[in-house]
Structures are given as structure tokens and as C-alpha cells.
Image (spheres, grey):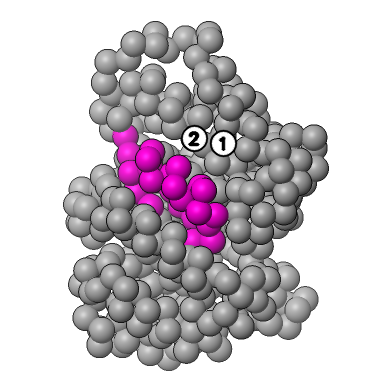
């Protein structure tokens, strides 16, 4: 991370209010995600995401649990945001995404916490599930740039995005780290309540790739971290290998073998999976091997593969100051 000369002086003052009112108005009649629930979050109503217009965070910390191209050796400067518009019942971050865990912060408090984080020489500023708090995130990124920091901004998301947010994000964000979860609309409806997910995720991904290209530099060992571009993630689900094969084939058809991928085996059932009796077991090695074989058959050139299954280090503890205390092994 390199710091450049700042004209703002870095202290508190009028800059904290710069453009905030204009961005804050996006929370009225909220359309920040494809649910377009239209609630007035400024008035304290909660959207489908579970959040009002008060920003809430689960953690702000250096994170070593991302792909090496993101975490590198010094960690990814990560802001875990509370709430989520996708609402997948199997989410590994369910304590903050679905169960309401997290603390409220003012824009000023958020900026102070993030500035302290980026001073720790992390490789990037990684915004996890930022869509439904996009007005805060856009303001935050502008303030971090105004204070002289040039580290890349990472938009780490579900892939389920409103066109208005994608359009604004590509003007600011350097690295996109989207999931492509489902290519089976029936499975999407079952898991997160919207059969439109496949086409919405592809539309968002097309715009991201068109704006910033594929992740570069590509050094999968993490000795040089990415500075700009897209890296797509896909989590393989038990009993749904066919969905994963559809995802890979569609991505190959749309973007070719050069699209960087992270194909994850880390699925672990949540309490909600057990309550529903759905996806309530870990992924079998044979299932993951079928997906990896398809990756190889299609000729994808830049791929992270996980060798482990259900490793507890992949499961965050948001009661701790660092939800992911140990680096994960990828190859």
C-alpha cells in the first residue's frame, strides 16, 4: 500500500459531510438491490437486507482467509458489513448476514476505523457484502482517496446486484470479487428466493469485466497481489454438482478460459440448513472432484482449487476481533 500526497490535511472537518447527504438519499425508497423493496430506510424501516440506513459492521480487520491474490502476505483490509439482500440460508457468515449480529457506526466512526486499518499496510480495502450499504461505501472510498491512500478497493459480493449499484461501483472499484452461486433458477429460488439470480449475476459480471478486465497481476502464490480486475468465486454445494457444472459452462461460454476462478469446497451446513433439512451435510470429495474435472476439461487457465473439505478455519467467528484467525491453504 502506497500513500500519496493528500490535500485534505487528514483531520476532521467539512470533508466528513462531503456528498454524504446526496448519497444518503438512496436509502429512501430503497432500490439498492434487485429486491427493490422500496422501504424508507432513513425512517428506520428495514429492507429485505435486514438493515436500516444506519451502517452496521461485523468486523474491521486484516483478513488472511481470502485467496492469496487478495490476502497476500500482509492481509486484506476487510470490512465485514452486517445484513445481506441475497439471504442464502446456507451463508457461512449467517451471524451477521441473517441473524443481526453487528454494531452500528456513524460515517465518521467508519472512516476512522478504516483509516486505522489501511495504515497497517494491508494490500487492499475489502468491502464484504457492500451492496445494501453502497451509499456509505461510495462515500467511504472517496474519503479514503481524498486522504491520500492509493490501495485498491475490493467489492466482495454475492453477484446479486442492482444495475444502478453496478454502474456506480465500476467508476470507483478496482477489484471485483463476485460469487456466481447458481445457474439453476429453481435452486436459486429455493436457496435465496429469486429465480432471476443467474441472469442478474451474469449481467453484473459482464459490466464488471467490461470495466476492469480480469484480475491482474495473476500471481496465485500471493507474492504479488491483484491490483485491478475480476476474480469469480463459486461454492460447490452438496447434491448439486449439476448446478456447478452449469455455472462453469456458462462462464466459459461468456468469458472464455482466461476468466480467473476460485472453486471452493469449503461448504459447511449452518443451523438453518439443519432446521430446513436442506443442504445439511458437507460436500463429498467425489462431488468436488467432478467439478474440478470440468474445470480442467473446459481449460480454465487461472484457478484456485481447495484441497480441504469442511475445514473449520473457513468458518468465521464474529464474536472474535478477527473472524478468520488462520490463513487458509489454497493451491
Q: Secondary structure at mark 2?
A: helix
Q: Which residue carries the number 1 mark?
A: 135
In the rendered image, which quarter contains the C terminus? bottom left
Please identify the quarter of the rendering in which residue 191 is found. Answer: bottom right
Q: Secondary structure at mark 1?
A: helix
On the image, the x and y values in percent for residue 291 come to 38, 85
Image position of 314 (left or right of 263): right
Please identify the quarter of the rendering in which residue 65 is found. Answer: bottom left
In front: 176, or 163? 163
Q: What residue appears at the point 54 percent right and 61 percent down from the top-left corner?
A: 160
In the rendered image, which quarter contains the N terminus? top left
Q: What residue appears at the point 68 percent right and 82 percent down from the top-left corner?
A: 278
Is residue 154 magenta-colored? yes
Q: What residue appears at the point 34 percent right and 48 percent down from the top-left corner?
A: 175
Structural crowding at the residue carrying mark 1, measured as other residues with C-alpha within 10 Å and reported as few (<14), some (14–19) or many (≥20): many
Residue 202 position (above or below residue 287): above
Residue 53 position (above or below residue 131): above
Q: What residue appears at the point 31 percent right and 50 percent down from the top-left corner?
A: 211
Disc 1 to disc 2: CB gap under 8 Å: yes
Please identify the quarter of the rendering in which residue 282 is found. Answer: bottom right
On the image, the x and y values in percent for residue 11 come to 47, 9
Q: Which residues are magenta?
A: 151-176
On the image, the x and y values in percent for residue 155 come to 44, 48
Image position of 269 (left or right of 251): right
In front: 293, or 201? 201
Label for residue 138?
Answer: 2
> Is residue 281 visible in this depiction of the protein?
no
Is residue 241 magenta-colored? no
Image position of 106 (left or right of 76): right
> Is residue 118 visible in this depiction of the protein?
yes
In front: 28, or 201? 28
Amino acid at each position: 500500500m502506497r500513500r500519496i500526497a493528500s490535500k485534505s490535511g487528514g483531520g476532521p472537518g467539512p470533508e466528513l459531510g462531503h456528498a454524504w447527504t446526496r448519497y444518503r438519499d438512496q436509502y429512501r425508497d430503497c432500490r439498492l438491490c434487485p429486491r427493490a423493496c422500496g422501504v424508507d430506510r432513513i425512517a428506520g424501516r428495514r429492507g429485505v437486507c435486514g438493515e436500516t440506513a444506519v451502517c452496521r459492521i461485523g468486523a474491521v480487520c486484516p483478513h488472511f482467509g481470502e485467496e492469496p491474490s487478495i490476502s497476500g502476505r500482509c492481509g486484506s483490509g476487510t470490512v465485514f458489513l452486517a445484513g445481506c439482500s441475497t439471504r442464502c440460508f446456507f451463508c457461512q457468515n449467517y451471524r451477521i448476514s441473517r441473524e443481526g449480529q453487528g454494531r452500528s457506526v456513524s460515517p465518521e466512526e467508519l472512516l476512522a476505523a478504516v483509516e486505522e486499518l489501511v495504515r497497517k499496510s494491508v494490500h487492499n480495502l475489502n468491502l464484504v457484502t457492500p451492496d445494501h450499504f453502497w451509499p456509505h461505501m461510495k462515500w467511504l472510498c472517496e474519503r479514503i482517496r481524498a486522504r491520500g491512500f492509493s490501495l485498491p478497493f475490493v467489492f466482495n459480493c454475492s453477484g446479486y446486484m442492482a444495475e444502478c449499484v453496478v454502474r456506480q461501483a465500476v467508476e470507483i472499484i478496482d477489484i471485483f470479487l463476485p460469487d456466481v452461486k447458481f445457474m439453476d433458477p429453481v435452486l436459486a429460488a429455493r436457496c435465496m428466493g429469486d429465480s432471476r439470480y443467474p441472469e442478474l449475476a451474469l449481467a453484473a459480471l459482464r459490466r464488471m469485466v467490461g470495466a476492469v478486465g480480469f484480475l491482474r497481476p495473476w500471481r496465485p502464490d500471493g507474492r504479488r497481489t491483484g491490483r485491478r480486475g475480476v476474480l469469480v468465486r463459486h461454492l460447490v454445494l452438496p447434491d448439486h454438482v449439476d448446478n456447478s457444472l452449469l455455472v462453469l459452462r456458462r462462464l466459459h461460454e461468456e468469458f472464455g478460459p482466461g476468466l480467473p476462478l476460485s472453486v471452493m469446497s469449503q461448504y459447511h451446513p449452518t443451523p438453518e440448513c439443519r432446521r430446513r433439512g436442506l443442504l445439511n451435510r458437507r460436500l463429498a470429495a467425489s462431488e468436488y472432484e467432478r467439478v474440478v474435472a470440468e474445470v480442467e476439461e473446459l481449460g480454465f487457465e487461472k484457478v484456485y482449487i481447495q484441497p480441504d473439505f469442511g475445514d473449520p478455519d473457513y468458518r468465521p467467528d464474529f464474536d472474535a476481533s478477527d473472524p478468520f484467525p488462520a490463513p487458509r491453504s489454497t493451491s
